[in-house]
Amino acid sequence: MNAPIGRVFAVIIILFALLIAWTSRWTVFNAQSLRDNPLNARTVIGEEKIDEGEILADDGTVLAKSIPAADHTFTRTYPQGSLFSQVVGYSNVQKGQDAGLELSDGQYLRGVQTGISAIIGQLGGGTQVGDNVDTTLDPKALAIVPSTGAIRAMFSLPTYDDNAPNADCGAPGCQLNGATQDRDTPGSTFKIVTVTAALDSGKFTPDSELNGDSPRIISGFPLENDSNQSWGLQTVSNALTYSINTIFAQLAQDVGRATMTEYMKRFGFYSKPPLDYPPGELLASRPYSLTTGKAYPPASPNEDIGRIGIGQGGILVTPLQMAMVAAAVANGGKLMVPHLTSRVVNPDGQIIDTIKPQLYSQVMKASTAQQVSQMMRNVVEEGTGKPADTLGLSLAGKTGTASIGPTGLNETEPWFIGFAPAVNPKIAIAVTIDKTDDGYGGTIAAPIAAEIMKLLLSEGQNG
């Protein structure tokens, strides 16, 4: 090759490299900023012409799909209406709105291409078809599989129809996913965290005895048991069975802030749940100041750790977090990463991604989990959870009844967390009712949880 031809060849190579670099700037490196530009109408036009993939329940039930519309465009429709509205979410290309799985799995559903494949795809023409997303959701229940972290469903009321997400649903906050976005007082369900820290740290055993008289001064103020009942000396196991506040407040204080905080972190507190879901729709569970409303830093000396130990004192949680607490105990102390997506399948039927079970944290020793499991079984057999023990499930659990609203109105938020069967658990659950008139976790939330778990276990839906 002579010198002039070599120079021409070099110029061509440089120009070609510049072309690739300039094209890659918009298709790869700055693609998101271009997409997010409100003046970019091409994005809307392009997405309207994508035949987005389906979102499917675990049994193949279609939760979301695209249907043909005018001018070779497609619109999203949700055959199950409001049943899975919060968790599935919605996608409205014209308004630039999306939420839930439609948002977090959007790259799969739209069949997003990057780099050179994006350039070739644009030149090739034809309809872009997205991938199907198979979920762990069950169309008939609300639960989590302890051994895998697979979430069967998340449902909350009030709800809305994701076919018309901008319509008036008749109640404030109906589009919020209560399982991941509500901050609730957990009441005595939090005692599972406290007893785990007490036993696993070696500071106490199930047979350790403490005085359960009422009232008792905790952090300078009197704390009472339910109906101000004094229990005298009771074992830790009995204290959980009958949900004795004054004993659990002592447990939390004796265990100490540092150790309590360490076990809370192991359960997932202080961090957003590691769920395959939009981060903006996930909240962390943690203690908050009752006076300022601001979150306490971990192990803050200003925390009333005694009252936090019984699920009061400013501790606020999501139902998902409390389901994770139950699941960790059920799974021998191992907390698995919760997930909604099970796999992604392209239009040719090829599996392009599979979500495998993943360990989040070894919360406690297996021996501790066995002790706590037996204590939770006692709660249902003999204690506050007996209303859940009518269906022959060998269910283990913990009730909670949080006082909410102005003093004197007797407004409560009933809770139940648990799993079934007590040996080799298949399903873990958290149920809460936002507000009742003097209702209790054992009489209201526990029977609901039992019915749901009976349905799942009878159908063999154990993941």
Image (tube, rainbow, N blue to C red):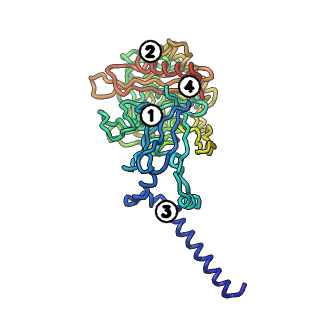
Q: Are marks 3 and 2 in contact (CB under 8 Å)?
A: no
Q: Are marks 4 and 3 in contact (CB under 8 Å)?
A: no
Q: Quadrant of the N terminus?
A: bottom right
Q: Earlier in the sequence, mark 3 or mark 1?
A: 3
Q: How far apart in space, not on screen, are marks 3 and 2 (Cα)?
A: 66 Å
Position of 132 relative to 401 (above/below): below
Q: Earlier in the sequence, mark 4 or mark 2?
A: 2
- In depth, the one of 250 and 24 nearer the eye is 24
| Residue 338 seen in render | no
Q: How far apart in space, not on screen, are marks 3 and 1 (Cα)?
A: 36 Å
Q: Residue furthest bottom?
A: 3
Residue 303, quarter of picture: top left
Q: Amino acid at mark 3?
A: Asn
Q: Residue furthest right?
A: 1
Task: Find residue 48 and report its horizontal and vertical position in percent.
Answer: 44, 50
- In depth, the one of 202 and 177 nearer the eye is 177
Q: Amino acid at mark 4?
A: Ile
Q: Are marks 2 and 1 in contact (CB under 8 Å)?
A: no
What secondary structure is found at the residue carrying circle 2? Answer: loop
Q: How far apart in space, not on screen, are marks 4 and 2 (Cα)?
A: 33 Å
What residue is disc 1 on? 79
Q: Residue at x 59, y 24 (%)?
A: 425
What secondary structure is found at the residue carrying circle 4? Answer: strand
Q: Residues within 10 Å of mark 3 (few under 14, many from 20)?
A: few
What residue is disc 2 on? 231
Q: Earlier in the sequence, mark 4 or mark 3?
A: 3
